[in-house]
Image (cartoon, grey):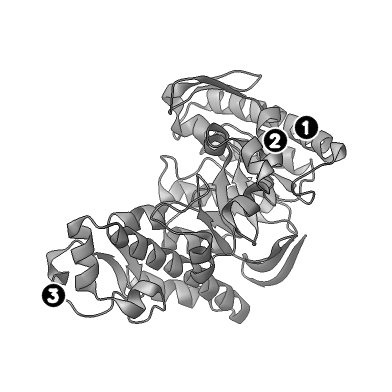
Amino acid sequence: MFTLMKQDGKARRGVYHTAHGDIQTPVFMNVATQAAIKGGLSALDLAKVGAQVTLCNTYHLHLRPGQDIIRTLGGLHGFINWKAPMLTDSGGFQVFSLAQLRKITEDGVQFQSHLDGRRIMMRPEDSMDIQWKLGADIAMAFDECIPNPSPKPYVEASIDRTTRWLVRCREEWLRLQDAGDAVNPTQVLWGINQGGTFEDLRIRHMNEIAALELPGYAIGGLAVGESAEDMYRIIDAVEPHMPVHKPRYLMGVGTPQNIIEAVKRGVDFFDCVMPSRNARHGHLYTSQGSMNMINEKYKADERAVDPACSCELCQNHSRAYLRHLFKSGEMLAQRLAVIHNLTYYNQLMQKIRDAIELGTLSELQERSLERV
């Protein structure tokens, strides 16, 4: 399902094939946690900004509206009206982000709903059942996202349990596939590497899960407290042990610089809430560097935010107008800003793909760093 077309050092230019279309890699997946991009964007907007893949979250959609409702409405593709590929996160990140509201056991994780306080048991089998009904093209295995730093004995016990959970995920996913009546019968299951910032544990865990011969693999548990240098060190350690002809996904990363650095280390897939979250607070990425649109200096600035950008904001409105919208608390400010940042990220990925094909990724990185 993955075709490796070209390499520039360790950087890879490829295509991942799904029933809902081909994904040109390296790719940034746009995060629609609750089946929507925060900031007022629709699936039609995502297509306009050049998005290839939409990512939704199993835990949040299980809470509302529920996977059974989404299934009756055609799965996530029909629910959102998104015709292109989709990926669902398993709920493993919420094991990290909702640490005060959960209890981990061998069987799974018991959550206390952040919405109404009710208790929810999420086992590997439950995550697979929910994702099967959501019908995304790629389902992620249920794991524990370990905070950094964590004591080595705890990390070792955690990755052993995550491996056992992965085996259970695969068994349940195969059972569901054999049962038929799938929303998306071509859905595939990817595994997740964990191990904190310990190179030996990361390598051991990667070798263990690679032996299961899944269609794709992610590096999880990074960008959760460690330095950028530690993140790059772990990617360097894990990458030689990841199957060459299967996609590699770095979960929850990151800044444009993080992405370029990870691409140079052999990563193919990325996701992060950063571009949309920062946009909603007036922080925009441009070809000339980042901009804080709340700044007083833009009060009467008639120029486009980024003259080199083709997005709806830059083609139609001034910096002064966007700043006014933010200062006035208008919802349009967030919408226009998110459209711009997602356009920037998706165009950056196209530039990265082009650079790998031309063998000029290092030059692209140098030009990008000059504008930080």
| Residue at image point 40% right, 65% down | 339
Residue type highlighted by circle 2: Met
Up/down of 79 relative to 297, above or below:
above
For the residues labelled 3 and 1, the Cα–Cα distance comes to 59 Å
User: Which of marks 1 and 3 precedes in the sequence?
Assistant: 1
Q: Quadrant of residue 280?
A: bottom left
- Element type where label 1 sits in the image: helix
Q: Which residue sits at x=18%, y=58%?
A: 328
Residue 291 in percent (x, y) is at 26, 66
Give how far across and how far down residue 170 sits, in percent.
Answer: 77, 36
Q: In the rendering, at what x and y percent does residue 238 appear?
A: 62, 48
Could you tell whether 71 is left or right of 353 in the image? right
The label number, if any, that marks residue 66 in the structure image: none
Tell me the CA gap for discs 1 and 2: 7 Å
List the residue tagged with mark 2.
Answer: 128
Q: Which of marks 3 and 1 is in front?
A: 3
Query: How far apart in space, not on screen, are marks 2 and 3 (Cα)?
Result: 53 Å
**Closer-to-camera residue (161/330):** 330
Mark 1 or 2 closer to N-term?
2
Q: What residue type is labelled 3?
A: Ala
Q: What residue type is labelled 1?
A: Glu
- In this rendering, would 249 be left or right of 113? right
Q: Which of marks 2 and 3 is nearer the N terminus?
A: 2
Q: Do the residues labelled 1 and 2 touch (CB within 8 Å)?
A: yes
Q: Is residue 31 above or below residue 121?
A: below
Is the residue marked by circle 3 packed among few (<14), some (14-19), or many (20+) residues within 10 Å?
Answer: few
Residue at (70%, 52%) from the top-left corner? Answer: 137
Q: Which residue is drawn at 22% across and 55% down?
A: 329
Residue assigned mark 1: 172
Residue 184 position in % (x across, y down): 75, 49
Question: What residue does disc 3 label?
Answer: 300
Question: Can residue 181 be seen at all in this image of the molecule?
Answer: yes
